């Protein structure tokens, strides 16, 4: 087989949907796994849907995810232009459409909208329109007269009404459709622009694309693509259709979900590496059921034959877990650089933010989680004294009051408020009193944090708070217990 060449051909219509990102990723992995080329082509022929700045989003997303293209608008590989509107200006699509007309595989259609509307019919509750080949019977003289008069037209594919068409997909196998279901789709629109379907076939052939990766919503269009390839006498590429991506309710992932695009996920605090890893598993699984992969490891392991036909569920719980695993494994300096803005948004006091970052690094799944873990450093929250009761530690609010009153002088006498020094002092107190560690540390931690769960232990928290603030909070806890405990 010739060198593998895949393409990612997005339309510049806004943020990159997770489904489009997966298409780009799979196309990249298929090419790179075989030492092939990954091509970027911008499909901007649908001018009504064009969004200003969307091309920049495409470039930015590919660059940040590491999906580096070998050819594209900015990297000429000799088969450009790589922007469809520029190819349209060169007359490429009209030239090939006319070739099909000469072969009898396409024809001019001059039907106006009123006539087209008259062909609509309702089938199973849906309004559909199947063109009746009316203009196929026009004589050469009638066609030339209409063209000379400047009558608006489209160019339609001439599909047979009888027989069947079969195409092969690497994931879904051989699929056969009745030709009666194949409408004579428009190849060139009345504005002179090609339709998405036609431009794809022409461009994929001229750019030497060997493997076409796309969503399974295009399965129904594939027979028409195949008939175009056959009409031109071109080699049909390998089709790889990806399964649908759904939300947890098994509905198609929509923009309203809040996490349907790559940029949505980045803004929500997810790491690019985790997003790519997660998206790779939306429809593909390795032989060994491994879950954590770098991009380089994905290139090595990816085999599209292990893709699934079944819809892939976008499981946000799993994505959060995966992101947390990446945060745990991350170099601390990089983690701190990324976490610092989230910490500073909550903690304005002069504390050691790196120590706070150390506490939360293994306890969060996404950066926005930081706020709820560390807000107590800024200000003691209101809390109920029932929090001092802990069955395993065998503590009660009453016992906690006694412990705090006993340990306060020990902590007041301490000058070194490092974690090790505080822990040593509390360990000495525990040994002297014959208490269990948790019997003392639970009430102390509750007193200085006011929270059931904290990112660090009592002594780590006190080290960050410092002596003055730690003692202020413990004294406040004693007063609270005295006031709120039953007389």
Image (tube, grey):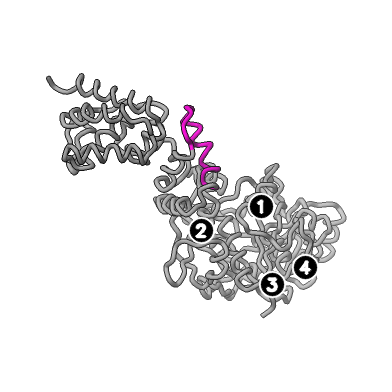
Given this view, does label 1 or label 4 mark the residue nearer the observer?
A: 1
Given this view, does label 2 or label 1 mark the residue nearer the observer?
A: 2
Residue linked to disc 4? 101
Distance of mark 1 from mark 3, alpha carbons? Answer: 23 Å
Q: Residue furthest bottom?
A: 1
Residue linked to disc 1? 11
Label whose residue precedes the other's in the sequence (4 or 3): 4
Residue linked to disc 3? 229
How crowded pointer 4 is (Cα within 10 Å; few <14, some 14-19, many 20+) is rated as: some
**The residue stretch that appears in magenta:** 334-353
Given this view, does label 4 or label 3 mark the residue nearer the observer?
A: 3
* Coordinates of residue 218 in the picture (x, y in percent): 57, 62
Label whose residue precedes the other's in the sequence (4 or 2): 4
Is 343 colored magenta in this rendering? yes
Distance of mark 2 from mark 1, alpha carbons? Answer: 24 Å
Picture layout, residue 478 above or below residue 165: above
Residue 277, numbered circle: 2
């Amino acid at each position: 087989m010739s060198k593998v060449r895949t393409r990612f051909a997005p339309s510049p219509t806004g943020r990159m949907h997770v489904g489009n990102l997966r298409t780009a990723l799979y196309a990249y992995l298929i090419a790179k796994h075989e030492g092939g080329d990954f091509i970027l082509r911008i499909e901007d022929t649908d001018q009504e849907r064009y969004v200003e700045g969307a091309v920049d989003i495409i470039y930015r997303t590919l660059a940040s995810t590491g999906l580096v293209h070998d050819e594209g608008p900015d990297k000429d590989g000799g088969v450009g232009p790589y922007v469809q509107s520029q190819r349209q200006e060169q007359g490429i699509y009209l030239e090939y459409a006319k070739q099909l007309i000469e072969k009898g595989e396409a024809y001019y259609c001059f039907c106006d909208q009123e006539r087209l509307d008259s062909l609509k019919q309702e089938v199973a509750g849906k309004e559909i329109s199947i063109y009746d080949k009316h203009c196929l019977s026009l004589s050469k003289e009638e066609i030339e007269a209409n063209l000379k008069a400047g009558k608006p037209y489209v160019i339609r594919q001439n599909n047979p009404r009888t027989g069947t068409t079969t195409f092969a997909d690497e994931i879904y196998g051989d699929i056969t459709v009745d030709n009666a279901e194949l409408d004579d789709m428009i190849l060139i629109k009345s504005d002179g622009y090609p339709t998405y379907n036609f431009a794809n076939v022409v461009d994929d052939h001229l750019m030497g694309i060997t493997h076409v990766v796309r969503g399974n919503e295009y399965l129904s269009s594939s027979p028409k693509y195949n008939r175009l390839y056959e009409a031109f006498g071109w080699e049909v590429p390998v089709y790889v259709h990806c399964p649908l991506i759904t939300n947890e309710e098994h509905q198609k992932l929509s923009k309203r979900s809040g996490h349907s695009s790559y940029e949505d996920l980045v803004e929500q605090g997810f790491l690019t590496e985790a997003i790519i890893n997660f998206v790779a598993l939306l429809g593909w699984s390795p032989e060994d059921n491994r879950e954590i992969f770098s991009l380089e490891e994905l290139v090595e392991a990816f085999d599209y034959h292990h893709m699934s036909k079944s819809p892939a569920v976008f499981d946000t719980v799993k994505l959060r877990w995966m992101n947390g695993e990446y945060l745990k494994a991350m170099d601390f300096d990089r983690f701190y650089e990324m976490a610092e803005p989230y910490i500073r948004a909550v903690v304005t006091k002069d504390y050691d933010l790196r120590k706070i970052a150390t506490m939360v690094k293994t306890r969060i799944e996404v950066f926005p989680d930081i706020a709820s873990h560390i807000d107590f450093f800024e200000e003691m929250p209101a809390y109920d004294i029932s929090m001092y009761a802990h069955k395993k530690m065998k503590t009660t609010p009453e016992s906690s009051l006694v412990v705090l009153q006993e340990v306060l002088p020990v902590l007041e006498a301490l000058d070194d408020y490092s974690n090790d020094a505080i822990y040593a002092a509390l360990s000495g107190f525990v040994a002297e009193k014959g208490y269990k560690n948790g019997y003392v540390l639970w009430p102390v931690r509750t007193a200085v944090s006011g929270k059931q769960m904290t990112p660090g232990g009592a002594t780590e928290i006190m080290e960050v708070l410092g002596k003055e603030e730690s003692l202020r909070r413990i004294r406040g806890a004693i007063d609270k217990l005295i006031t709120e405990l039953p007389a």
